[in-house]
Image (cartoon, helix red, strand yellow):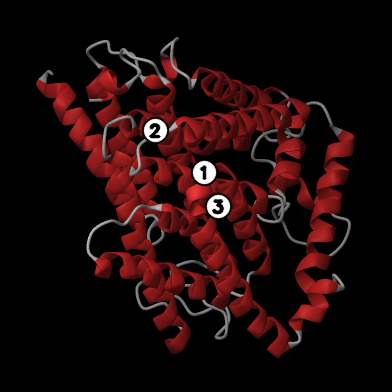
Amino acid sequence: MSGSRRVGRRLQEGTLYVVLFMLPFSKSAVEVGFGLLLAGWLLEHAGGERPLFLHRRSPVRPVALALAAYVVICGLSWLWSTNPALSIDGWIGKTLEYALFTVFVADVARRPGVATRCGIVLAMSAVVVGLDGAVGQYLGADPLRGMRSHNYQDMQGPYENPIDLAVYLMTVLPIVLAQRWSGPRIVRVARWVIVGFLGWCLIETRAEGNWVALSAGLLFLAVVDRRLRVPIAWAGAAFGAAALVPLVRTGYLASLLTFKTGGIQDRAYMWGTAWEMIKTRPFLGHGLNTFMDNYLAFCVGGERMPRYAHNCYLQIWAETGLAGLAAVGWLLSGMLRLWARAIRMGRDVVERPMLAGTAAGLVAFMLHAVFDTNFYALRHAALFWILAGLACGRASVVLADTGPVGEKGAS
């Protein structure tokens, strides 16, 4: 291996671990990390080696085609956009960057041990996030970032509001739960202590929609990995019982069951506004990154201020039309099929659970995107596409036969 390739590989791998750890605490870590991953990727492939997403024999090829289709459709939307400058800016600074995150991380994840180490880094970072949230809830301000709490009773950690913290926790929790923590008994006990602590933090966010999404992710995990069904059942039962306590105590459960909460009513206005946009341009959309710019012109009620749709799929439809929505559906369903197939065929007792847990966390993320802004918040979107690349890279190793896209090429 040449010196430049060796440097490129080390730069990518080290950057990946740092970004995963720092992502909840710093938006700039995402931007700086992207630049370093790009530099490392270019160094590694300067010699002519084909990356995973460009290799014709790669099992990831269908996902690569879907990803390329979505990037192209978003890029072309500026031609008919109501604000071409915003669309071009969104395509370069968001769509293209997230897609490349997936490509870069997928290449790194093909190397033995990377996925397991990523899982350890995520667990460590999540514990720091939880401790930060617990201390911040007690003090009324985040001790690391100095922000005032959104609500003294709801935990928000290093994020701007409790729901954002809940999105992070529901995505990472299945990964921590699914990891194989072998060794002394104290290590196995530590795993359950961490899972219990993060579950308590999620309950303290009072973000009920995230609880439902996490349940769907855990159900997916139980379906694809039979060996995890018993611990998932115990964890789910404990979480459900603990989550009911604050809902019953505050009387909020009755509001949820009758759909009379402020959040549900507010989302009805935002979804209605998105639908009004869609009806005027259902096939082409109004242009990438223009939803907030057009919001007031189509507002059907609620607060009269530019807002996201709080349903990522409706917003994708409103901005990029049916073509963009179809491309996203093709991409996400293709990823799910790839991961599920690799999990079923996997034999690695260490990294197979990591792949299953990552897929479960991403399932929860996709489902919750129906009710919030997951794909439009920088740290959440970066987390999703990084983990998606991680899962795709490991799946390619499991499913590939031999040669440069299999274990031989990953070593």
From the image, tell me which residue sits under label 2: 394
Q: Is residue 231 left or right of residue 5?
A: right
Mark 2 or mark 3, whichever is nearer to me = 2
Q: Is residue 370 left or right of residue 146?
A: right
Q: Is residue 359 in sight in this rendering?
A: yes
Q: Residue at x 86, y 52 (%)?
A: 272
Q: Position of residue 225 (x, y in %)?
A: 51, 45
**Which sits earlier in the primary sequence, circle 2 or circle 3?**
3
Counting from the top left corner in percent of width and height, residue 47 is at 22, 12
* Quadrant hosting residue 40: top left
> Taking the image as drawn, is residue 261 in sight?
no
Q: Residue type at mark 1: give it.
A: Ala
Mark 3 falls on what kind of element? loop
Residue 335 quadrant: top right
Front residue (pair 341, 306): 341
- Residue receiving disc 3: 377
Whether residue 88 is situated above or below residue 375 in the rendered picture:
above
> Where does the image place residue 58, in percent across and percent down from the top left?
44, 16
Q: CA distance from mark 2 to mark 3?
A: 26 Å
Image position of 37 with respect to 129: above or below: above
Cα distance between the residues tagged 1 and 2:
11 Å
